Image: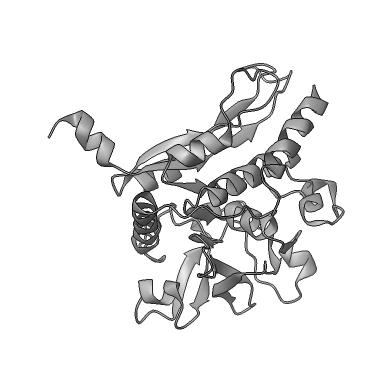
Amino acid sequence: MSLLSHSASRLKIGLSACFSHADPDRSLFTNKTLQYVEQSIAHWIMSAGALVVMVPCPTGETARGDVTLKHYAEWLDGVVMHGGSDVWPGSYGEEPLKDAWLGDRVRDLYDLAVVEAFSQAGKPIFGVCRGLQLINVAFGGTLYQDIETQHPGALQHRNAITYDQHVHEVDIVPHTQLARLYPGRRRVTVNSIHHQGIKRLAPGFDIEAWSHPDGLPEAIRRQGGNGRGYIAATQWHPEFRSREGVTLDDMPLLRDFLAACSQARARPRPGRGPLQIRDRAERLLRRALLRRH
């Protein structure tokens, strides 16, 4: 088999972009907007043989041509929603309680547009950390702006010093797909690198894991049926593997997502986007970026 044909048979997985907005004081790429991916998550997807393609934001001050997020959604087999900055509270109808929790409104609009495009195309979506929060917001849920402030008795879910080595336990909900991926595992250990989390779950989703003992949603999955495609997400970062081997094995999650991508490649099931108005998120993104310039 030639390299070309072998590559053609591999799954092509989109990875949403992180943003570093134009900064006149930055010495490298001065006053230029950067879109990038974090190395670990790209390598995680590639570890199962899939090809990874960053999905760049198609709008902005330098935009040219007619490429849209819909083109990426039609071409790719699925998408992983990256971790990163806070979600802007306005995205779920709240005022920021602190300036430090303003998040990134432009990235929210971009991420919402990505979720909308891939959902409309019937392609699987997997969210990591911020990705889980953004998916929950896209489909009508809300977030805690800061868990320790707003959820009495909460664990410390983020430690800036230990970062990806900070862990806690989660309880897997019996009889869920997550439980089937980890048979015989009820309470497991995961990393924890977030200070925001799900407050109200989006309609049409189920919770598959809760943090222990403070009871915050740690894994969610879209309910099946009625033409709904695969959408799942974890609050932890499966791509950040513990050197001590104490955290939950990441590969069953990845294999589950990629299996759904293979099925969608064979039998795509286009559906409605989360906002129920076709292309609304992409239009809002374009308008927001035009206003900035």
Q: Residue 81: give x, y in percent of width and height.
A: 54, 48
Residue at 79% x, 46% y: name it. 102
- Residue beneath the point at 56% across and 26% down: 67
Q: Is residue 34 above or below residue 162?
A: above
Q: Quadrant of residue 21?
A: top right
Q: Whole-percent x and y of residue 184?
A: 35, 82
Q: Quadrant of the N terminus?
A: top left
**Is 178 situated above or below 54?**
below
Number of marks drawn: 0
Which one is in front, 123 or 251?
A: 123
Left/right placement of residue 25 relative to residue 46 reads right
Q: Nearer the viewer, residue 10 or 160?
A: 10
Q: Please give the name of the residue rendered at 41% of the width and 65% of the height, measured from the top-left corner.
A: 247
Residue drawn at point x = 43 percent, y = 73 percent: 177
**Does the rendering let one see residue 46?**
yes
Direction from residue 81 to residue 197 in the image, left or right: right
Say which quadrant the C terminus sits in.
Answer: top right
